[in-house]
Image (cartoon, rainbow, N blue to C red):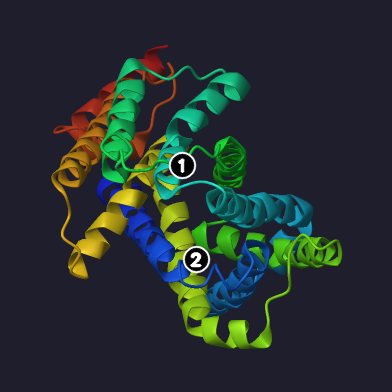
Amino acid sequence: MTFSRSPAVGMAGLLLATTAWGSLFLASKPVLPHVDPVWFTLLRYSIATLGFMLVLRLRGPLPWGALRRHGWRLAGLGFVGYGVFSAMVLVGLAHSVPSHGAVIMATMPITTQLVRWALDGQRPGRAAIGSTLLALLGVVMVSGALTRHGDTSHASTLAGDLTAFAGTLGWIAYTRGAARLPELDVIGFSALSALASWPLLCAATLLLAAFGLAPVPSAAAAWNAWPALVYIGLVPTVFGVLAYNFGVRQLGVVTGTAFLNFVPVSVLLIGAAMGSRPAAHELAGVMLVVSGLLVHTLSQRVQAAQRPVPAGDIDRKALVCRSPRPQRLLSMARMRRSSS
């Protein structure tokens, strides 16, 4: 199934993905004290891999040929995107505070633009940087980092914060990899990267458990956590990743990561729907995040519209669709070609 490139549809996909990921934090909070983050990640993506493959099979024949051609690359991308990102962020947050975690997640758009600048030579524009900083300020306000003064603890959270920040690089690498494999569509890339990386996730988990770095959860803990794990494995993971990869294919990597600022906002909105009344600073932060996302998306559309078309590259379909006088302009183009 293919979709025409549409900014509105891409934005809807990214909003659905970030909302699903917001629910992930609420659903996983009661599970993490009983299930180690590494085992949590393995169980989550074991369920998700089955879900991905089911969706892929319902669509048609499984693309085993693409898996053979890109198997190792898909395994590496899935490992850093699914495994390293999830486990390191959860481990980091276990040694930090939620407000720090929200700010670290919100630095991903800036980090993505710096990575593109360093690796691809694509310097971000002023509008992109300004809108990202605006959304980042909104996330800081939502988290309460600017208004919370009651914490008297002097324990350093630097190690946890750096661990979570390093983990975000895994998701940036996964997102860049998705954009560089146009042969695979959204469902194919998501499913095959999960399938190819599952043996690596399993081996890494068992290795860490053997060295005592990832305690094996008890049978009672796993049984009590299975409803939350099934939800997390299917909704935030399968549906969320598919919607996010679809949005990235529609709007690009930079815009896709910019919408990650909406994750803590979605947590606030879901909490409000469950009866938790938001504070004034939280509402102000939501407005800043939404404004930053709108400015960023509009600036990307303006930049794309102003991008010059290479000389001699005539797109007849675009000419016919966009021109009010398609036949006349097409005839003029043919006359110029024949005269030259």
Q: Could one spot residue 334 in this view of the protein?
A: no
Q: Could one spot residue 244 in this view of the protein?
A: yes
When asked about the image quadrant of residue 337, the answer is: top left
Instruction: Name the spot of residue 269 as percent of width and height, x first.
Output: 23, 58
Describe the element under mark 1 as helix, strand or loop.
loop
Task: Please tell me how crowded label 2 is: few (under 14), some (14-19), or many (20+) other residues with Cα within 10 Å.
Answer: many
The single residue placed furthest to the top in the displayed view is: 340
When asked about the image quadrant of residue 60, the answer is: bottom right
Using the numbered discs, state the Cα–Cα distance from disc 1 to disc 2 in whole angstroms: 34 Å
Quadrant (top left/top right/bottom left/bottom right) for the C terminus: top left
Q: Which residue is mark 2?
A: 237
Answer above or below: position of 181 versus 134: below
Check disc 2 and give the amino acid type: Thr
- Residue drawn at point x = 65 percent, y = 57 percent: 83
- Residue drawn at point x = 58 percent, y = 73 percent: 34
Q: N-terminal of the two: label 1 or label 2?
A: 1
Answer above or below: position of 62 versus 270: below
Task: Please tell me how crowded label 1 is: few (under 14), some (14-19), or many (20+) other residues with Cα within 10 Å.
Answer: few
Q: Which residue is mark 1?
A: 153
Q: Are marks 1 and 2 in contact (CB under 8 Å)?
A: no
Check disc 1 and give the amino acid type: Ser
| Residue 151 located left or right of residue 288 | right
Instruction: Name the spot of residue 36 as percent of width and height, x first.
Output: 64, 66
Q: Pick the residue in front: 217 or 312.
A: 217
- Residue drawn at point x = 34 percent, y = 29 percent: 132
Q: Pick the residue in front: 168 or 97.
A: 97
Instruction: Name the spot of residue 187 as percent of width and height, x first.
Output: 52, 64
